[in-house]
Amino acid sequence: MPHIVDDAARWEKVARSFAERLPDADGAARRRHAVRELADNGLTTLLGPARHGGAEQPWRVAHRVVREIGRVDVEIAELLGRHYVWYWIAEFIGTDEKIDHIGEVSTRARWFYGGATDPGAAELTVVDDGDVMLFTGRIAPAVGADVSTMTILQGTRPDVATPISALAYTSHTGISVPGNDGSRIEVTAADIPWTGALGHVDKRFEPRPYNGLLVPTLELLLLDIALAGRRTDDEATAAATRQADHVVEHAQQLHDHRRTIGDADVRAQVALVSGLAATVRALPHSPQLVEGRGR
């Protein structure tokens, strides 16, 4: 992997300034304002390739950013943290061609992602209709659907256990977002070309160990946000934060060597994240944690 310059101090300052200037409004208006500001401040494309206008920062910086925002607003921090995971979905499960293409267009267009709360749910039904896939069903609960440019569709074919993930514009005619909280997405025969099935070649999924890091990456971000949201300096929280720092650094090594890691490396990271989750749950007045299932 190419060397990435870590500019954490700068981006922490950007995140802190962003969070301090969030409006007092609640609900959808606050989320829409936040997403606009995140894009304008360069935080939406923090992980994006520099050659396409992104900051090309390592994952450890993304963790620092969501922590800073989480100290002020847990909801917006979660919205951004989940966006980072979906923004990286081609890296997690895509082919080399899709990694390059999605990295470029996501960064240049400053896409913002929404999708299922559980990234491994695959709640939709997928029908093979020749050159296209037809996704149908309901994604609930969802996060960010009301403010997203892109929606992650995940589903399974009746005769194939392996889930299929694909990107779709939230404005797609087969996609609707009822209500104003972005917590539900209705999908009706949303047609996506088979070329958009991430990680698939000739309609068959080509697995690699890095696929397994998607869910623990999200869970680690959510744990970081939960710790930031405590807004306390007690020793138990400080110790848990130090533990989180260790787990983030281990994760960074795996992200840096994503083409060569093995299943054992992923299992080790899953164990570290699970241990951190147990620590956070044991803290006094610990918030409920959302966890996802693996691919």
Image (cartoon, grey):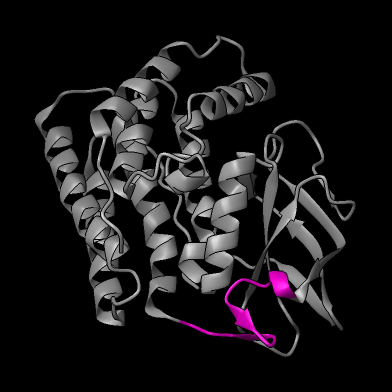
**In the depicted view, which residue is nearer to us: 259 or 233?**
259
Instruction: Name above or below for residue 114 compared with residue 209.
Output: above
Q: Position of residue 199 (x, y in %)?
A: 57, 76
Q: Which region of the structure is painted magenta? A: 195-207
Instruction: Name above or below for residue 209 compared with residue 276.
Output: below
Dividing the picture into quadrants, the one containing residue 66 is top left
Q: At 67% from the left edge and 40% from the top edge, which residue is drawn?
A: 148
Instruction: Name above or below for residue 218 compared with residue 31.
Output: below
Q: Position of residue 28 (x, y in %)?
A: 68, 25
Q: At 25% from the left edge and 41% from the top edge, which residue is drawn?
A: 6
- Would you say residue 172 is visible in this rendering? yes
Q: Position of residue 117 (x, y in %)?
A: 57, 51
Asked whether 209 falls inside the magenta stretch, the response is no
Query: How many circles with numbers are drawn on the protein?
Result: 0
69 left or right of 8 in image: right
Q: At 36% from the left edge and 41% from the top edge, which residue is drawn?
A: 62
